[in-house]
Amino acid sequence: MRPNERRAAILDALCIRRKDTIANLAEEFGVNEKTIRRDIEELSCSYPIETVRGRYGGGVKVMDWYHQNRKTLSPEQATLLKKLAPGLEGHDLEVLNSIISQFAPY
């Protein structure tokens, strides 16, 4: 696997898992930890990735708000969901609002 392919795979894995250890990523991709650290450093220049110090070599995580290839709601879908909101209460209303805030276009 070439470095750019490995970095894309690392980013994909982090977007699914949200966080992982350097050691686990090194083992998974068949490279040493120093290589993973360089890959993470390179990725962090373009993506919201941060390293975390840890007792066992530390880890890496992608920011909560970042998702690759995330679909967004069309304006019509967002409008329909907003029309449904007054009929909801409690937890259902919270869930609907979280959907709108996460997937509605900015």
Image (spheres, rainbow, N blue to C red):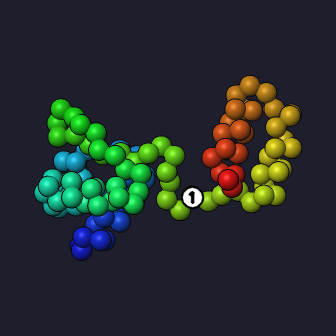
| Percent coordinates x, y for residue 77 in the rendering | 78, 55
Return the residue found at the far bottom. Answer: 2
Q: Quadrant of residue 84?
A: top right
Q: Position of residue 9 (x, y in %)?
A: 34, 63
Name the element at disc 1.
loop
Figure check: 55 above or below 23: above
Residue at image point 24% right, 74% down: 2
Give the class, few, some or many, for how many residues have Cα within 10 Å of label 1's Cα (few <14, many ≥20). few
Residue 56 location, x and y as percent? 17, 36
The one of 68 and 91 positioned closer to us in this rendering = 68
* The quadrant where residue 8 appears: bottom left
Q: On the rendered image, what quadrant is the N terminus found in?
A: bottom left
Say which residue appears at 81% left-offset and 44% top-offset: 82
The total of numbered circles placed on residues is 1
- Residue at position x 37%, y 50% in the image: 49
Residue drawn at the location 73% of the way across and 32% of the way down: 92
In the displayed orientation, state which residue is furthest to the front.
45
Residue type of the residue flagged with mark 1: Arg
Report the residue marked by disc 1.
70
Q: Position of residue 103 (x, y in %)?
A: 65, 51
Residue 7 lies left or right of residue 89; in this view the side is left
Whether residue 13 is visible here, answered yes or no, is no
Residue 44 visible to the viewer: yes
Relative placement, left or right, of 29 versus 98 is left
